[in-house]
Image: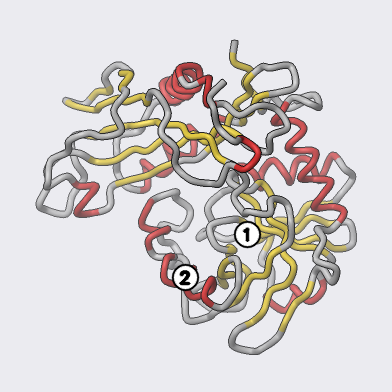
C-alpha cells in the first residue's frame, strides 16, 4: 500500500503511476494506450483550446472491507459523456471502451486505492477533447480521450457536515436551452467568479436560480439540489441542470425508503417549507445545507439550527456509501467489482 496519510487526504490531484489514452483519427477510435507521463503534446490550434470542444466526467472507486475494489455506476458516466459529446459535436467515445479504460486504470493504479474506513476513495477523471487544428468555428476531425485517477479525501474538509449557501441573482449558471445539461468545462469556468464571491462572503458555494425568470431553484454550485418535506424528496426539473448520477441514485433509494419523489419546478419561496436540504454529486455524495441566504432580499432559509445534517439526508448518505463500499447489497447493478 502506498505510504500516504489516507485519513487526512484532501480533495486534490496526486500523481499516480499510469493513465489511459485513446485517439480518434480518420473517422475511428484507436486502441487504448497506457502512459506513465502526466503530459501530452497538442497542436496550438486545437479546437479544445480555441472553441471549448471538451467534456469530462468524474466517478469513484472504493475499497471494501473484503479488500475488493468497486467502481460506482461507470456505465452511467459513459452514457453522460456521450451526451456531452453530442452537445459539442465531438466524436462519441464508445461505452465499452470507456468502461475498459476505467477498469484498466484502476487496476494499474491499485496501490493508490485508499483502504476501507479511511474516508478516502480513488477519483477517476475521464476527459475528451478536440485536438485537431481548426481556425474556423467548426468541430475538429481529431480527438483525444484521457483517463487518469488520483486518491482523494472528502470534498469538504469536515466531511459530512452542513455548510451555508448564498443566492446571488447577478450570476447565471447556464442559459435556457444552453449547455447546462452537459458536463463541459465552459460551464465550470463560467462559475468561477460567482463561486469566488460566495467564498469571500463566507459561504461554501453559490445557489443559482433559473436564468430566465429568476423564480425557480436551479443548481447549487456544481451540484444538484434536493429538499425534503412531508416524507417527500424534491429535486428541481430544468433543461439547464446537469443530470447528476448521484441524484438519480438518491431518488431510487428515497423511494425504497418509502418516500415520495418529485422532480419538478421548485419556486424559491418553497425553500421556507423544507425540513432538510442538500447538494449532491460525485465528489461529496451529499453536502447537507445548513441555510441558504438570499443576498438580494436578505431572506434566510434555515434547515439546520444545530448545524447537524438532517436524519433523512444522513440515512440516504449512509445507504449510498454502504452500497459503494460493499457493506450493503447492490440490488440495482450499480457497482462493478473488479477481479
* Residue lying at 64% horizontally and 70% vertically, measured from the top left: 165
Please give the residue where the numbered disc 1 appears in the rendered image.
237
Question: Which residue is more in the foreground, 39 or 15?
Answer: 15
Q: Is residue 240 left or right of residue 73?
A: left
Please give the residue where the numbered disc 2 appears in the rendered image.
196
Q: Quadrant of the N terminus?
A: top right
Inter-mark Cα distance, 1 to 2: 26 Å
Q: Which numbered disc covers residue 309? A: none
| Residue 62 picture quarter | top right
Q: How many marks?
A: 2
Work out whether mark 1 precedes mark 2 in sequence or the reverse, and give the earlier one. Answer: 2
Residue 186 lies, in percent from the top left, at 36, 57
Q: Nearer the viewer, mark 1 or mark 2?
A: 2
| Residue 142 picture quarter | top left
Residue 167 lies, in percent from the top left, at 59, 76
Residue 88 lies, in percent from the top left, at 32, 47
Using a 10 Å C-alpha cutoff, classify the residue at mark 1 as few (fewer than 14 neighbours), some (14 to 19) or many (20 or more).
some
* Residue lying at 84% horizontally and 57% vertically, measured from the top left: 232
| Above or below, comparing residue 325 to residue 241 in the picture | above
Question: Which residue is more in the foreground, 114 or 205?
Answer: 114
Using a 10 Å C-alpha cutoff, classify the residue at mark 2 as few (fewer than 14 neighbours), some (14 to 19) or many (20 or more).
some
Q: What is the residue that sits farthest to the top in this orientation?
A: 339
* Residue lying at 49% horizontally and 73% vertically, measured from the top left: 211
Q: Is residue 41 left or right of residue 120?
A: left
**Is the residue under label 2 in contact with that under label 1 (CB below 8 Å)?**
no
* Residue lying at 82% horizontally and 61% vertically, measured from the top left: 308
Question: Which residue is more in the foreground, 16 or 149?
Answer: 16
Q: Quadrant of the C terminus?
A: top right
| Above or below, comparing residue 221 to residue 1 in the picture | below
Amino acid at each position: 500500500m502506498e505510504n500516504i496519510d489516507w485519513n487526512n487526504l484532501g480533495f486534490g490531484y496526486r500523481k499516480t503511476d499510469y493513465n489511459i489514452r485513446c485517439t480518434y483519427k480518420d473517422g475511428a477510435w484507436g486502441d487504448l494506450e497506457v502512459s506513465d507521463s502526466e503530459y501530452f503534446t497538442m497542436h496550438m490550434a486545437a479546437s479544445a483550446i480555441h472553441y471549448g470542444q471538451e467534456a469530462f466526467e468524474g466517478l469513484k472507486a472504493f475499497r471494501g472491507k473484503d479488500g475488493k475494489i468497486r467502481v460506482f455506476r461507470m456505465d452511467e458516466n459513459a452514457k453522460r459523456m456521450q451526451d456531452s459529446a453530442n452537445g459539442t459535436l465531438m466524436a462519441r467515445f464508445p461505452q465499452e471502451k470507456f468502461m475498459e479504460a476505467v477498469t484498466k486504470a484502476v487496476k494499474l493504479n491499485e496501490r493508490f486505492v485508499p483502504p476501507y474506513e479511511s474516508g478516502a476513495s480513488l477519483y477517476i477523471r475521464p476527459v475528451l477533447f478536440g485536438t485537431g487544428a481548426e481556425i474556423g468555428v467548426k468541430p475538429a476531425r481529431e480527438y483525444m480521450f484521457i483517463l487518469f485517477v488520483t486518491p482523494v479525501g472528502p470534498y469538504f474538509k469536515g466531511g459530512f457536515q452542513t455548510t451555508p449557501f448564498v443566492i446571488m441573482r447577478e450570476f447565471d449558471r447556464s442559459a435556457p436551452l444552453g449547455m447546462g445539461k452537459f458536463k463541459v468545462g465552459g460551464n465550470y469556468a463560467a462559475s468561477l467568479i460567482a463561486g469566488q464571491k460566495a467564498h469571500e462572503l463566507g459561504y461554501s458555494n453559490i445557489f443559482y436560480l433559473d436564468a430566465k425568470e429568476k423564480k425557480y431553484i436551479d443548481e447549487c454550485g456544481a451540484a444538484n439540489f434536493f429538499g425534503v418535506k412531508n416524507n417527500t424528496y424534491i429535486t428541481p426539473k430544468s433543461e439547464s441542470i446537469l443530470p447528476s448520477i448521484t441524484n438519480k441514485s438518491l431518488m431510487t433509494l428515497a423511494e425504497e425508503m418509502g418516500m415520495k419523489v418529485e422532480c419538478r419546478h421548485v419556486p424559491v419561496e418553497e425553500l421556507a417549507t423544507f425540513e432538510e436540504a442538500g447538494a449532491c454529486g460525485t465528489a461529496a455524495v451529499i453536502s447537507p445545507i445548513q441555510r441558504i441566504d438570499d443576498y438580494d432580499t436578505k431572506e434566510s432559509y434555515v434547515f439546520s439550527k444545530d448545524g447537524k445534517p438532517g436524519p433523512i439526508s444522513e440515512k440516504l448518505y449512509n445507504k449510498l456509501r454502504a452500497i459503494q463500499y460493499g457493506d450493503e447489497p447492490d440490488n440495482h447493478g450499480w457497482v462493478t467489482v473488479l477481479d
